[in-house]
């Protein structure tokens, strides 16, 4: 049975100002949220208080709870977002759903629930959305035109990130330090085509310009992989024992970035060895220090989730580590997205 909820509700906005190292400049954000940076806030587990905030490119105006519509709330643990044309797919983990909205107005379009079980991430290819599900250890597939459920693909292992490249889907068969495989799905048949094994625990994957990049690590080393998506062969791999526990791989302007403990590192796509000198180090301690991390247009966005009950402390740096802005996020800010 289809479980699709089509919605049409109005937008309710909450506006506040942020703190920045630069002087405050009022730049009113209109109902069109293009050319902004979205911040995804998990909220407290079990309390259905996840939300989405946004900040202007100048970091001078901040708008809270852009998803909230009348009596509607986003849900319990907003895990991630994915974009397809003018749509945003918001993956809400503990609510077992994916909310589809217009990415520029946040007007609701649909809610996906069928066969979704603790969803984590979403990617798009061949007119379909592919959602990883932690509880069922599967990828569920949906038509992006009518939002109907198409198929469940059993991965039979932990699943996390999912990316699309060369009209194929690449699934991170690993989560929380368990697992070391990348599963490749043929989008024509929605069957598993092949699997790539890596050393140690697979931490993250990203796709960019015909390649998939992967990073795996343990406490004593980090491994790097560049995969040619034309033939799904690993064309470059190298390891560093000086850079340990690498994770949170991101791509910006065709360059790669990742975190190793408190250090922010740069990985150029043609590198065959590790530059073990970090771009800079983020000061602080605690599990929540770099809970949110991304690089957008040459700026590093970080979020310290603090005690996971208070609002997160967001700090933005340039690539040399100079702080260019700081403000409060939501509870457990876990991601930043260019809109």
Image: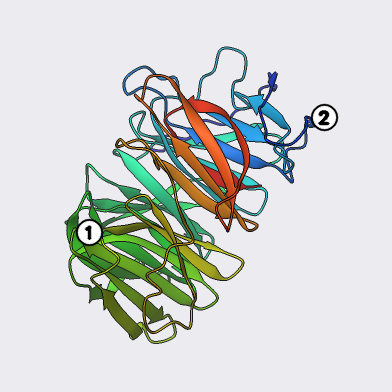
Percent position of residue 284, x then y: 38, 38
Indicate left or right for 9 with 268 as reference. Answer: right
Q: Which residue is mark 1?
A: 155
Residue 261 appears anywhere in the view = yes
Sequence-first disc among 1 and 2: 2
Quadrant in which the N terminus appears: top left
Residue for point 66% across, 27% down? 19
Identify the image quadrant of residue 234: bottom left
Mark 2: give few (<14), some (14-19) or many (20+) Cα within 10 Å: few
Residue situated furthest top in the rendering:
71
Check the image and report above or below for 216 versus 224: above
Residue for point 32% across, 24% down? 45
Q: How is the image coloured?
A: rainbow
Percent position of residue 319, x then y: 58, 58
Is 237 in front, or is 227?
237
Is 78 in front, or is 305?
305
Indicate left or right for 132 with 30 as reference. Answer: left
Indicate left or right for 142 with 234 as reference. Answer: right
Q: Element type at marker 1?
A: loop
Q: Which residue is mark 2?
A: 28
Residue 176 is tagged as none
Q: Element type at marker 2?
A: loop
Identify the image quadrant of residue 187: bottom left
């Amino acid at each position: 049975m289809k479980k699709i909820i089509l919605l049409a509700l109005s937008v309710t906005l909450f506006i506040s100002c942020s703190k920045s190292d630069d002087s405050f400049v009022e730049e009113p954000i209109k109902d069109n949220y293009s050319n902004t940076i979205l911040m995804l806030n998990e909220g407290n587990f079990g309390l259905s208080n996840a939300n989405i905030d946004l900040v202007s490119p100048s970091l001078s105006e901040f708008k809270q709870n852009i998803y909230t519509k009348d009596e509607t709330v986003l849900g319990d643990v907003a895990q991630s977002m994915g974009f397809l044309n003018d749509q945003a797919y918001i993956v809400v983990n503990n609510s077992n759903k994916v909310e589809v909205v217009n990415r520029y107005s946040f007007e609701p379009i649909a809610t996906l629930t069928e066969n979704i079980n603790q969803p984590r991430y979403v990617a798009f290819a061949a007119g379909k959305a592919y959602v990883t599900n932690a509880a069922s250890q599967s990828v569920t597939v949906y038509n992006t035109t009518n939002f109907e459920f198409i198929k469940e693909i059993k991965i039979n292992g932990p699943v996390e990130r999912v990316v699309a490249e060369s009209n194929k889907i690449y699934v991170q068969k690993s989560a929380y330090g368990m697992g070391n495989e990348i599963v490749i799905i043929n989008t024509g048949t929605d069957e598993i085509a092949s699997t790539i094994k890596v050393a140690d625990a697979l931490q993250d994957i990203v796709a960019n310009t015909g390649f998939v990049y992967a990073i795996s690590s343990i406490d004593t080393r980090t491994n790097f992989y560049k995969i040619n998506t034309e033939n799904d062969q690993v064309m470059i791999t190298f390891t560093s024992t000086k850079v340990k526990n690498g994770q949170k791989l991101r791509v910006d302007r065709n360059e790669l970035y990742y975190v190793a403990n408190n250090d922010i590192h740069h990985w150029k796509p043609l590198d065959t060895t590790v530059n073990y000198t970090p771009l800079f180090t983020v000061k602080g301690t605690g599990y929540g220090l770099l809970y949110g991390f991304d690089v957008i247009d040459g700026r590093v966005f970080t979020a310290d989730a603090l005690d996971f009950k208070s609002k997160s402390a967001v700090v933005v740096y340039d690539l040399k580590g100079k702080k260019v802005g700081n403000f409060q996020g939501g509870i457990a800010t876990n991601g930043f997205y260019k809109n």
